[in-house]
Image (tube, helix red, strand yellow):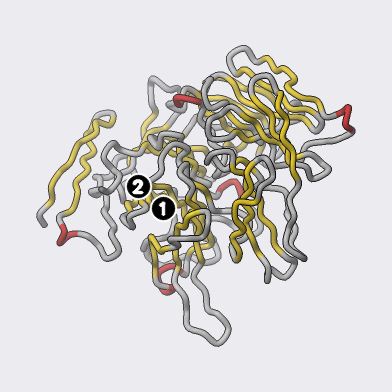
Amino acid sequence: MNRRCLFATIIASGILGLCLSSPGDRAEGGDLRLSQAAPQPPRNNLSCPNAIDSVDPTHGGRIRQLPGKPDGHTHNIYYHRNPWSANNAYLIGVQTDVQQKNWRVVVYNGEGCFLKELFPISDYDWRLAWDRNSPEVLYTWKPRALYKYNVTTGKAEVLKSFAPLNLALKPPGPSLNQSGDRILVITSDGTFRSYRLPDMEEERTFRVTYPPNCSSVWREERYIGYRNYVATACHSTDLSTRAILVYDDTGTLIHRIDGIGMGHYDFSPDGQLAYFKMPGVPRGGAKTPLEIRVMNLDGTNDRVLYSVPHSQARYLQNLHLSWPDTVSHWFVASFFPSARNLPSTYDSPLDEIVLITTSGKYRFLARTGTVIPPQEGFWGQPLASPSSDGSRVSFNSNRSGAINQYILWVPTGAVPK
């Protein structure tokens, strides 16, 4: 096999080589795989106490298990919430007890070394957003107020109280627009409200008109990271109607995307939507493949980037797509299986994090090893979330027996050209 080695990244005591296959080595569909790494035992990192470093033996990805909680679990804050601060200076995580209760928000440095606990969620909410410019500042909330929180000093200040209006905040929490100069919240009366930062002036408000029999569950509403655009989604009880509605923050409807429901998709910083269709067997029809697709926000240029036959994808329980905040030409997919439906031997896709480009090329970065038990284990789903620059990915896994938070580094040059 003729391979052309593009680069080598020094990892701890060894070297992980990444080689780009020659055209004859490329798998059907544009798969460009990392060279398989020799198995190496996980080892403690002396410069990052209690962190455990390893190299994925299947795809060669460099992984760090963050310092965990001996009597509980640790995880990130969901797939579309960027856990890294500006410039990747800090990383947010959540620690819980063994029953996944008593949540506490903690902070690591950008390399995953534990720094300190910030607050229990009885004080402030975990559904937070980092400032896009200041690495020490995040925005969190209580039911009736929005807060600015400094992770260095541990001090919070009220940005806006909604108590005088007799209003509370809905669960999506705060989000920031693309330039980082406006912050959005949704109040209990269903009003989308945004404010200029840092002075919280220039309020803009609007309400959404949903299609008939289509309602939101108020989980995913947010600035999407493109201009001042805001997304919300709805579905009918029988799921016959599903839609994503994209507005600007003045209340102008940009586009209604029908047939795509809530969750697991994400938006690019140049106005694209990545979404997927799970494999299935329509009534009276042929088996359909897994398809990961991308389209423009106006519905044009809808195309398949990654497709897997039904027979090969049947072990997947689900997946999530997440786009780096400042990267337009690729995103990551994180797959996971159910403990009730596992193959006798490994074959992809199953439990991988995959980098997918808008040109249709893709690269498997690492396996997470997570397997989701019936009726539990939500936070054991990988929920992979890349940093703004795409240099690293936060993910979860229960492969150690407990739920732990991990970092996967994306090697320089790993993006297929």
Of helix, strand and loop, which one carries label 1? strand
Observer-nearest of 331 and 153: 331
Q: Residues within 10 Å of mark 1 (few under 14, many from 20)?
A: many
Tag shown at residue 352: 1
Is residue 393 visible in the rendered image? The answer is: yes
Query: Could you tell me the amino acid type at mark 2?
Result: Leu
Query: Could you tell me the amino acid type at mark 1?
Result: Glu
**Is tag 1's residue or tag 2's residue first in the polypeptide sequence?**
1
Q: Residue at x 37, y 61 (%)?
A: 348
* In this view, 140 is above or below 280: above
Going by the image, does 340 lie left or right of 28?
A: right
- Distance between the alpha carbons at the discs numbered 1 and 2: 7 Å
Is residue 370 visible in the rendered image? The answer is: no
Observer-nearest of 87 and 268: 268
Marks 1 and 2 in Cβ contact (< 8 Å): yes
Residue 261 quadrant: bottom right
Q: Residue at x 40, y 37 (%)?
A: 390
Residue 57's x, y, as percent?
A: 31, 47
Tag shown at residue 136: none
Residue tagged 2: 365
Of all residues shown, which one is farthest toward the bottom? 284
* In this view, 333 is above or below 410: below
Observer-nearest of 140 and 176: 176
